[in-house]
Image (tube, helix red, strand yellow):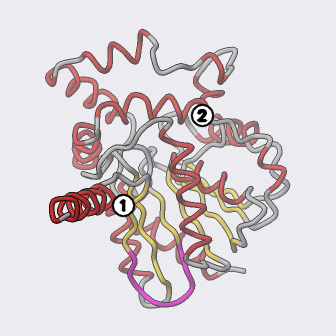
Amino acid sequence: MKNLILLLVSFVFSLSIYAKNESQPISVEVTGKGKPIVLIPGFTVPGDIWNPLVKKLEKNYECHIVTLAGFGGKEPIEFPWLPKVNESLKKYILKNDLQNATIIGHSLGGTIATWLAAQNDLKLSKIILIDALPASGALMIPDFNPENLIYESPYNNQQLAMDDVAFEQTATAMSKGMSLKESAREKIKNWILESDRKTYVYGYTDYLKLDLRENLKNISIPVTIIAASQPYGEEMVKQTYKNQYANLKDYNFIIAENSAHFIMLDKPEWFLKQMQTILSSK
C-alpha cells in the first residue's frame, strides 16, 4: 500500500512538472495600466522589439507584449504552428477579458492581428498593421495555392539540413533587405539565428499558406496600415496594398518614407509619433 501511494505521488508530481514545462504557443508579458493593447512582433522577432513603444505607452495603457513559440528564446511547439498561435491569442484575449483592446502587429504579427479582427466573438477597438499583408504567399508565389505548400518540400529540407555557417549566410542575406541600418540588420540576423530552426522553416510555410483576403470582409473596426516605402518604392507599395486589401471596406494608409520593413528600427522617432497619434484618434 505504501509503495502504491508513493507511486501515485510520483505520477502526480511528474504530471505537474510536465504541465509546467509544456511549451505554449505564446508567451505574454504585461506592463502598464489603462486601456489594453496587445503587441505582436513579426516572424523570428522577440516581443522586446516593442520596448521603446511600450515605455511611451505604459503610463496610459496596459500593454500585453507577445513573443511567439520558437522565437526569442521561447520553447518550440508541435506543428502546425501558426494556427495554434492564432487560437492561443484569441483564447488569451477572451480569458483576460480584454474588452475594446487595440492590436498592434508588425509583419506576421499584423497578419495575426488581421485574423483576430475578423473573429466575430472578439470585441476589439482597432488594429494597427505595420508593413503587414493578409496574404504574403499570394504576393511571393506565382499561381498561389495554399494546398501546394507543404512542410516536406525540397526547399524546406535544404533549410533544415544547412550547417551553422550556411544558415548564418542565409540569415545575413535575409536581413539585408529588411532595414536600411547596418546595426538593425545585425539584430535581425541574430533573431533569425537564435530562432528554433524547425519553427523558422515550417512556421514560415504556415505563414505563406495563410490567406486572409476573404476574411477582410468580416472586419468592421478601424484599421490603420503603415507601409515601408523601401526597397520597392512608393508607387509599387501603394498598388500592392490596394490589391491585397481590396476586400477591406475602409482603412487609414500611411507610407513610411525612407524605411524598409522594420520601420520601428529605421525611423524610431517618427514611428513613435505616428503610433501615439493613431492611438489617440477615435
Q: Amino acid at mark 1?
A: Gly
**Image quadrant in which you'd find residue 179:** top left
Q: Viewed as shown, does residue 58 lie left or right of 219? A: left
Q: What's the residue at 39%, 40% (across, down)?
A: 178
- Locate residue 251, reporting x and y percent: 75, 59
Of circles 1 and 2, the one toward us is 1
Residue in front for this viewpoint, 266 or 142: 142
User: Regarding mark 2 in the picture, which secondary structure is present there?
Assistant: helix
Residue on which disc 1 sits: 47
Say which quadrant the N terminus sits in.
bottom left
Give coordinates of residue 240: x percent, y percent.
68, 36
Query: Would you identify the image quadrant in which residue 53 lies?
Result: bottom left
Which residue is the site of mark 2?
A: 136
Dominant SS in magenta = strand
Q: Is residue 179 above or below residue 142?
A: below
Image coordinates for residue 130, horizontal then vertical, percent: 54, 54
